[in-house]
Image (tube, grey):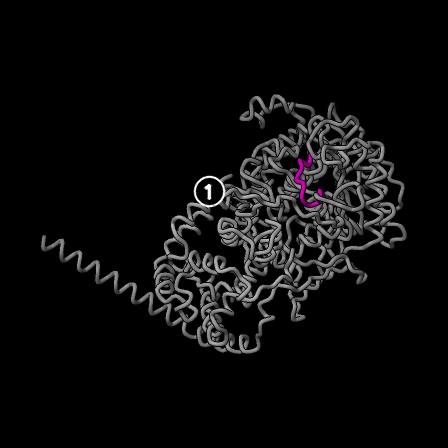
Amino acid sequence: MKVIKRIFKILIILTVTALLVLGGAVIYKVYPLYEEYSLEAARAVEESNSNTFKRNLTSYFYDDEGGLLTELSGNGSKIYLTFDEIPENVVNAFIAVEDRSFWEHKGIDLKGIVRVGIEFVTSGGERVHGASTITQQLVRNVFITKEVTLERKIKEICYALEVEKKYSKEEIIEFYINNIYFANNCYGIEAAAQFYFNKPACELSLNETAYLCAIPNSPSYYDPLKNKSNAIPRRDKVLKDMQECEMITETQRIQALREDLVLNEKKPIEIKDYETTYAIDCAVRYLMKLDGFLFRYSFAAMEDYNFYMETYNQAYERLRAELYTGGYVIKTTLNKEKQELLQMSVDNALAFDEEKAENGQFALQGAATVINNETGKVEAIVGGRTQGGGTYTLNRAYQSYRQPGSSIKPLIVYLPALERGYTDRSVLTDIDVEKAKEEPEKVLEMYGAKITLRAAVESSKNGAAWRLFCEITPKEGLSYLQNMSFNRIVPDDYYPASSLGGFTYGTTTVEMANAYSCVANHGQFQQTDCIVSILDKYGEELYEPYEIRQVYGAEQADLMIDILKGVIKKGTARKMGWKSTVEAAGKTGTTNNSKDGWFVGITPDYAMAVWVGYDMPRELSNLYGGSYPAQIWRDAMEALVEGTKQERFETTTGIVSGDEKYYPGRDGSEVLSPGYTIQNYRDDHALADRIEALIQQISQEADRGQQEAYYEQALTLAEQIYGQTLKGAQRRRLEEVYHMYFD
């Protein structure tokens, strides 16, 4: 027993010592920040006045020529109540549920801060949540960002202390209740009361008051227009807390619970055109980035993805609301003439079908996005057909995720293959997809017709793409989409069907145009948007372009463009009738039963993605990538490139086709031996030359890992050689290399 007591005492001493050491380290880190932020807070709060806390600033959006696209303001955001005008139940509800010591503390809750400090130490800095008083919540909304960091928490405390010095408790709770967000662009209790109940705040019942005061805790989740019942448990807590604080009696609480809630459930109609809704989305996402939101594009499991989307939607809703009242000035790259041109192309191509859906909108729809390859910016975007005086509830160009069909193949199958050493002349096996589905473990052993990679792309052979994707592996193929910020690639997509565009959710025309623009830019990717400037209410510039990163090799991207030119000249898009002298490259895409049709293409100046289909997927006869989508693309692109000086794609390498140094001047179809042509000979020896070049790199490379990478590339190339004699010779050569460098 004595030994146990002794061990226990030692453990206590060690634990306390560790906490003191960690606590000392935290103090050492915190104190300089506290001094810095105290001075900053003192200056900012001293310069503030009551207008600082009012959410009534309008944000403005402009096109590329300075024309006004739209101005945004919140629902009732200019309705401000003084402390005397705020109902007592509203004040009591927030104090009871958020900050019971509000009238006594000086801006911070010391016990809560100690608790947060202990959590910060014991979690290794991972947890910095909680202990925010009403004053801290107010300064967080007005003066500082929302990201959860130790520095932000210290800054929040400093500002709260300064606000409490300058303003009375009545003023602070007045600012808070008028500033707090109630979802649907409603700031303040008066705006919320009128929006949700069609009455002023002074006429709210206790039940209605508690229900509204539940919303700010999580505006996205408790949004009454999305799900009225979500806020009911939180309302019950508000009433219970008020009773515990003796602000209401038990009888009043029970009576409030028995009352029916009759909401004004008529959703607000926002009349916005497609370019404006997209510009708003771009601005919100950038504000999320500034606010510290971590965008993710890969997930371990569907549960992980679903949790991420929940946090994403909450952050999006909060920052979207801030955009409506933050007084921002946003300049964009959206061009009025190009927008009208793109809209007309969509409308004209689909004018043959006037069927209406239940919501009164055209049943058959289309979407398209145009990106300038030089700037990487969206210049025109159409989310549907023109109808009903410009009232758009859905912008399909960035909001509708649809399966892309074969238009995805160059991005996740063929370019990754080129990265692994394949060429446009590499011979693929066009297997039976139905058999592959039945016996997925035998895919790489299946036989089928032989076809070159170039021809497989031009004729969109599904079997060749399926087998090659299995060889590359779905994980590697889809990693390229994740590296290009595709938002909805999920764990359930890591299957062979993705090679044909069979995704769980799919993609959008914005994402597809962005990816093809990457190919046009020699494999360099920059996440697109339409923003060039975001000025805050103080006139400070907030916007910086997204970083550029190399996703595909320049040589491989240039070769893919050359291959995709064949799709338009003689492949699945040949019937579109491209007549311009400007070079064009692209890929068709059609999903099962013709439910979705895509054409995604590029010229030296532009990348454009087009989708056609029904909002509720169903079959449309004659819908395939080379029909209506290609027609829209051709009509719009021919007008866009008219008068351009850049008619040819520039290449960084000059390598765009097979090597013809063998048997020069002779026709590639000439037969050298049964089943073996001059072109086969040329392709085989070009592969052998590349293998020899890799062997030379192995001999000159000091890093073992890089040597192994070169060796693996050489092995892959050797297996692509068609002639058995040369293939055997290269295998033996590589076996010698293995013994020389890796044995």
Q: Quadrant of residue 107?
A: bottom left
Please tell me whether mark 1 sits on a helix, a strand or a loop: helix
**Can I make out residue 661 in this image?**
no
Q: Is residue 404 magenta?
A: yes
Q: Which residue is mark 1?
A: 258
Q: Residue at x 50, y 74 (%)?
A: 167
The quadrant in which residue 569 appears is top right
Where does residue 247 sit, x and y in percent of width and height? Answer: 41, 57
- Residue drawn 74% across and 32% down? 357
Q: Is residue 441 above or below residue 416?
A: above
125 to the left or right of 432: left
Q: Residue at x 42, y 65 (%)?
A: 102
Q: Residue 227, image x and y in percent? A: 55, 42
Please, is residue 673 above or below residue 407 in the view?
Answer: above
- Location of residue 711 in the rendering, given as x and y in whole percent from the top left corner: 56, 43
Closer to the camera, 4 or 197?
Answer: 197
| Whether residue 542 is visible | yes
246, above or below 696, in the image: below
Range of magenta residues: 395-405
Specify the amino acid type for callout 1. Arg
> Which one is in front, 21 or 434?
21
